[in-house]
Image (spheres, helix red, strand yellow):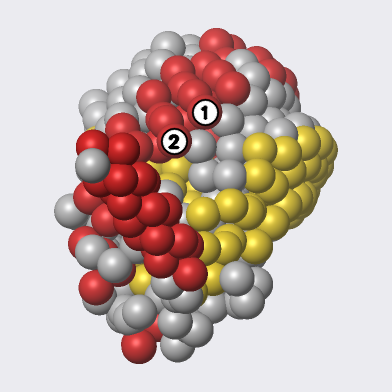
Amino acid sequence: MGLGVTCHPFEELHKLRWLSISNNNLGTGHDGDLEFVNTLSNKTSLELISINANNFGGHLPISITNLTSLSILALDLNELYGDIPAGIGNLVNLESMNTERNKFTGNIPQEIGKLQQLKKLSFSGNKFTGNIPSSVGNLTQLTHLYMSLNYLSGGIPPTLGKYQNLLLLNLNHNNLSGPIPKEVMSIPSIAIYMGMSGNNLNGSLPIEVGTLKNLGVLDLSSNMLSGEIPATLGSCVSLERLRMQDNFFVGKIPPSLNSLRGMEVLDFSYNNLSGNIPQFLKDFHLLRILNLSFNNFEGMVPEKGVFKNSSAVSVIGNNSKLCSSIPELQLSKCKLKTARLILTAKLIVAASVIVCVA
């Protein structure tokens, strides 16, 4: 069903405040579907437009930028395309804007930084290109920011570090590059999720990551990050899921991670980590997925805790110096040479004591 301008369905509703026609089959998927928005231009009291989960196609009419009383704009799950119209910065009362899972293109306009009442902003699942505008950092009231699944490039703006109320940041699956700004790793309010996976980020993980003491999920997978895992990561005591696979991290798993006892999913696979697998991981009683595969770990694999469940642990692709007595892990058995040497030394010492006493 199309909803066209010829119907003028809302023209006589002079005091209209909420317009919600979500979750229907409205629209043709083609340009012109949203011409009815032009009939709303004089609705100065309109606070909410929710047309999500339909089949509306075409461009978002410029006339929508005249609705300066809007606080909620929900456009997600449609077939909308083209640019976000110039003048979007007029909607200074917006608190929530969702364009998720459409086909919008072009750059995210710098004007978005004028919407300083925004608390939730989603551009995910579109075809946006260009840089993340630095003006997004002006949205200091934001609690949720979604920009995943686009074609955004350039660096992550350090201005995002201005956020004091942000709970969730999702930048996954773009073409972002450069280092992770330390300012972004210093947002103390983030508690739900921080995701930057599937980009081209490089450099080391800033030591400021330790600021994220309330964070539940951190996903940095599938980038080009390098250097050692900072010991400060152990300060993120609320972490339940940590995904750092498919990078170039080196060195040992730091002992400070012993404090992450709430961990449920831990993935360090496809890096260049080395040394022994820490014994403290066996004491992570909530751990249900542990992936340490394709690194350079060596020595004995712990045998208790999560390691007793071979379906929850992966250590394949490490060097031949990794050993275990757990058959399901398909590793060589650990040699007892060291233990025997220690026992022999103890026997020699004991014999010497006996001789001396005699």
Q: Is residue 337 left or right of residue 149?
A: left
Image height of 180 relative to 83, above or below: above
Q: Nearer the viewer, residue 201 or 110?
A: 201
Crowd rating for badge 1 (residues with CA inside 10 Å; few <14, some 14–19, many 20+) = some
> In what element is the residue under mark 1?
helix
> In what element is the residue under mark 2?
helix
Q: How many marks?
A: 2
**Discs 1/2, front:** 2
Residue 6 in sight: no
In the rendering, at what x and y percent does residue 43 appear? 37, 28
- Say the numbered circle drawn on residue 231: 1
* Residue lying at 59% horizontally and 38% vertically, measured from the top left: 229
- Say the numbered circle drawn on residue 255: 2
Q: Nearer the viewer, residue 191 or 266?
A: 266
Q: Nearer the viewer, residue 177 or 113?
A: 177
Cα separation between marks 1 and 2: 8 Å
- Say the numbered circle drawn on residue 350: none
Residue 175 in sight: yes
In the rendering, at what x and y percent does residue 199 appear? 70, 52
* Residue lying at 63% horizontally and 54% vertically, measured from the top left: 274
Please tell me in which quadrant of the rendered image residue 154 appears: top right
Q: Nearer the viewer, residue 203 or 72?
A: 203
The kind of residue on which mark 1 rests is Ala
* Residue lying at 33% horizontally and 81% vertically, measured from the top left: 326
Image height of 79 relative to 191, above or below: below
Q: In which quadrant will I find the C terminus?
A: top left
The kind of residue on which mark 2 rests is Pro
Q: Are marks 1 and 2 in contact (CB under 8 Å)?
A: yes
Crowd rating for badge 2 (residues with CA inside 10 Å; few <14, some 14–19, many 20+) = few
